[in-house]
Amino acid sequence: MRGKFITFEGPEGCGKSTHSKALAERLRARGIETILTREPGGTPLAEKIRALVREETGDAPVASAETLLFLAARAQNVARAVLPALERGAWVLCDRFADSTFAYQGFGRGFDLAELERLNAFATGGLAPDLTILLDVPPEISRERLGTRQNATGEKADRMENAGRLFHKAVRDGFLALAALPENAGRFAVIDSSGGMDRVSAAIDAAVERLI
Ligand code: TMP
């Protein structure tokens, strides 16, 4: 039987990486083979594309090139990592997927959603998540968490993180608008991620339980 495909989405600093790792551990503890991947990234080529889209250089990609780079990374990750795992029955957790393209390049950069859907379908061969966990946080918390992380790790903000307040507000509102679309009703679990780790984990488990 094919495995389940769960994506984690949300604005910067929403806790996707922490919660996707924690869920992978809980699923493995239940004996479910689980792989954790991320976008952009997940294969050696896609990780190179990740570095390209995030770095601040004199030659930043124009918005259409940025979109195609994210989609190229997705095509590679789906074909090389996600689909083979699902087909052997493993569950796949993905830290960001197509909804990030719709939120960042659609609502953020202003590209037409129907066009992005066509391009995304070309990249994924039509693969869609069984469940999308949207970890929602307001922009102030998002900025605060990013600042804390950067202070702790010494990392500088990347090109996407530097895109400005209005852009990030449009992205956050865009994720919520995507979750509210009638065609997405059964797929999204929207979870307030400004609360404590335990409460958010419990809400994630409740959403995942519906798949088991
Ligand atoms: P993150 O996964 O560490 O948050 O970094 C990925 C960055 O790339 C983040 O700023 C969101 C952005 N992104 C897009 O703009 N479009 C996409 O399709 C994906 C997957 C990510």
Image (spheres, grey):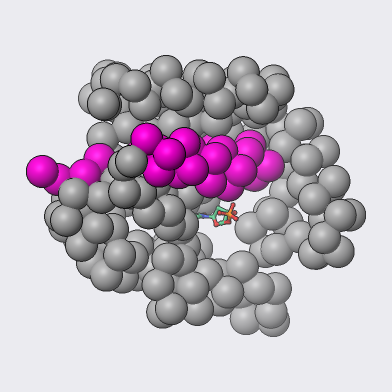
Quick check: is 166 in the magenta stretch? Answer: no
Q: Residue at x 50, y 19 (%)?
A: 203
Question: Does residue 209 sit above or below 170 in this rendering?
Answer: above
Is residue 5 visible in this depiction of the protein?
no
The foreground one among 61 and 206 is: 206
Q: Quadrant of the C terminus?
A: top left
Residue 95 image offset from top left, x and y in percent:
47, 49
Q: Quadrant of the N terminus?
A: top left
Is residue 203 visible in this depiction of the protein?
yes
Whether residue 80 sits left or right of residue 173 in the image: it is: left
Residue 199 image offset from top left, x and y in percent:
62, 18
Residue 157 image offset from top left, x and y in percent:
76, 60
Question: Does residue 173 sit above or below 25 in this rendering?
Answer: above
Q: Residue at x 76, y 31 (%)?
A: 141
In the rendered image, the residue lying farthest to the left is 1
Which of the 4 quarters of the picture holds residue 61?
Answer: bottom right
Residue 142 image offset from top left, x and y in percent:
72, 37
The foreground one among 39 and 64 is: 39
Question: Does residue 162 sit above or below 66 in this rendering?
Answer: above
Task: Provide the residue span drawn in magenta.
Answer: 1-30
Which of the 4 quarters of the picture holds residue 124?
Answer: bottom left
In the rendered image, the residue lying farthest to the right is 151
Question: Does residue 67 sit above or below 175 in this rendering?
Answer: below
The foreground one among 14 and 57 is: 14
Quick check: is 9 in the magenta stretch? Answer: yes
The foreground one among 13 and 112 is: 13
